[in-house]
Image (cartoon, rainbow, N blue to C red):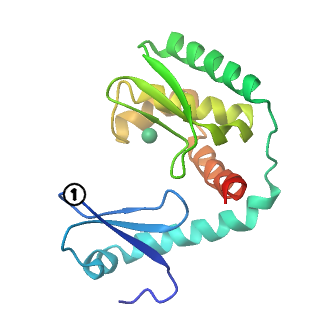
Amino acid sequence: MELPNIPYKVSHRDVRYPRLEFRTGELLLVLPYGYKPDPILNKHQKWIRKKMALVEECLKHSTSKKMVERTEQDFRDLTFILAKKTLTELGGRLNHIYFRMMRTKWASLSSRRNLTINRLMRHLPDHLLSYVIFHEVVHLKEKRHNDKFWKRISKKFDDYQELEKDLFVYWFQVVKRIQ
Ligand SMILES: [Zn+2]
């Protein structure tokens, strides 16, 4: 094990392949039952170090990001407006939009076309809220984060890499509210 300074958590689940997640800024190893962490940690050392550097940079900048204070109602109204606008732009439809407190992601789209929005998005600036919704609606057409997916994204948000980074920075700010 050659990653002395990197804390990580292990979660054994009913999965076929091991995977690494970095969604909360903390390294999480999702492993099939009976699988040891070392092989995957060693194999992906480079990737892990790169991610860790990003996390550190984000932590440094996180205090410079201003949290938006909207009322719950304003937030929901804005979400519905943005979702409607995005669906008009891209086509497709959603069944429901749910609002939930989530600890690992900003939003998600189910195979039943339900969009779940993290209530913590209430504190994001308009353009990031808009980006997250657009991102999820693109998932109606492209499930995975493949080249086709990012191509669709970049048609509207050519600075999406910057936005993804900003979302990461905001995450560190916002989670403080629920700790
Ligand atoms: Zn996505």
In this view, the residue in front, 17 or 44, is 17
Would you identify the image quadrant in which residue 70 lies? top right
> Is 141 on the left or on the right of 153, as rendered?
left
Would you identify the image quadrant in which residue 81 lies? top right
Mark 1: which secondary structure? Answer: loop
Figure label count: 1
> Is 166 on the left or on the right of 101, as rendered?
right
Q: Residue at x 80, y 60 (%)?
A: 63
Quarter, ligand 1: top left
- Tell me residue 98's x, y (percent): 52, 27
Q: Does residue 86 sit above or below 104 in this rendering? A: above
Q: Does residue 23 sit above or below 128 in this rendering? A: below
Would you identify the image quadrant in which residue 149 lies? top left
Label 1 C-beta lies within 8 Å of the nearest ligand 1 atom: no
Quarter of the image with the C terminus in it? bottom right
- The residue type indicated by label 1 comes to Asp
In this view, the residue in front, 151 or 44, is 44
Q: Residue at x 55, y 63 (%)?
A: 25
- Tell me residue 36's x, y (percent): 24, 79
Assess disc 1: are there few (<14), some (14-19) or many (≥20) residues with their C-alpha within 10 Å of its C-alpha.
Answer: few
Q: Does residue 101 sit above or below 126 in this rendering? A: below
Q: Residue at x 59, y 14 (%)?
A: 85
- Tell me residue 10's x, y (percent): 37, 71
Quarter of the image with the N terminus in it? bottom left
Tag 1 residue: 14
Q: Residue at x 52, y 13 (%)?
A: 89
In this view, the residue in front, 172 or 14, is 14
